[in-house]
Image: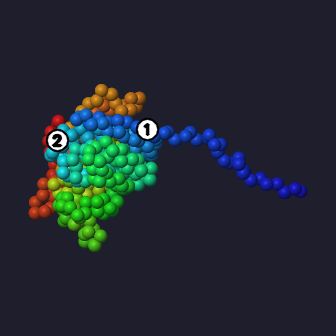
Amino acid sequence: MDDYDYGTGALMEDPEDYYPPSPPPTKQVFTMQGGKAVTLHLVGHSPTEAHHLWNGAKFISDYLEDDPATRVRGKTVLELGAAAGLPSLAAAILGARRVVMTDFPDPDLVANMQKNIDECDATVEPAGSVAARVHAMGFVWGADPEPLLARLSGGNNGEAPGAATGAAADPESSKVASAPRFDVLVLADLLFRHSEHGALVKTIKETMARDGAAYVFFTSYRPWKQDLDMGFFDVARNAGLAVEQVSERKLEKPLFENDPGDLDVQKTVKGFVVRWAAAEDGHDDAGAAAAAPVLR
């Protein structure tokens, strides 16, 4: 009886054209209110949705530009989930002292952020001013913030909340607790990641200066999950932070025009600011209620 190889061999291999090719990278131009055009490269596809230029990023940029002297000029800025990094670049153009632009630590995402920094730098005078102040980094929400805070070393960039953060007494936690903090945090269209709300709030508490502000702008792109999106602010309040609505705008059309659900919700961009709650004797009032909305 002849031996016969019943191995599947090439039968189990996918044909070369079995999987569709990844979408190519794209490019968009955002024009700031003062007329400055910012070119943004976007990765072709990302499981973290970093291939979109989100409405939240556009409107945080507008919000910073509405009052740059108060909101960003001379300040240190940390952006979480930056994707193309529009708010980070806008902050630098508007005079931020130092900006750290972060997204998931995927090499392609970090390289794309750096590409946008370099391209913006080439269009802003003096040459090199943006590249010197904006840094692209990979960061996982809720992870050790020390690499982020290290970017602020050597400057008086905000008072750490210290005991109010509930920092542990071990050496590493003490090192983080005593480090300078960011004046401004940017969270643009991140709230649809419901399972990450706790990690986002943890990072805010570990990186935001005592007198700092975290700007959280978003659209509920899935209107039937709007309550889950808003749940982020309950997590923030329960963690000892104060929440105030500062903006609400309705667009002419939604970002994703063929998606199901309430169109008015999909066309609405809401903006909130998260700060440390009022403190007494160095301790935050975790039960502080949200301030009444002030819409602009």
Q: CA distance from mark 2 to mark 1?
A: 31 Å
Quarter assignment of residue 32: top left
Q: Residue 111 location in percent, x, y?
A: 42, 50
Q: Which residue lies most toward the left here?
A: 281
Q: Judge the density around disc 1: few (<14), some (14-19), many (≥20) Cα neighbours within 10 Å.
A: few
Quarter containing the N terminus: bottom right
Label 2 amino acid?
Answer: Asp
Quarter containing the C terminus: top left
The dot on residue 26 is 1
Quarter assignment of residue 201: bottom left
Q: Residue 24 location in percent, x, y?
A: 48, 39
Q: Is residue 221 visible?
A: no
Question: Which is nearer the eye, 187 or 74?
Answer: 74
Left or right position of 49 against 164: right
Determine the residue positioned at 64% across, 45% down. Answer: 14
The dot on residue 207 is none
Q: Residue 64 location in percent, x, y?
A: 21, 42
The dot on residue 67 is 2
Determine the residue positioned at 18% across, 46% down. Answer: 71
Is 135 placed above or below 150 here? above
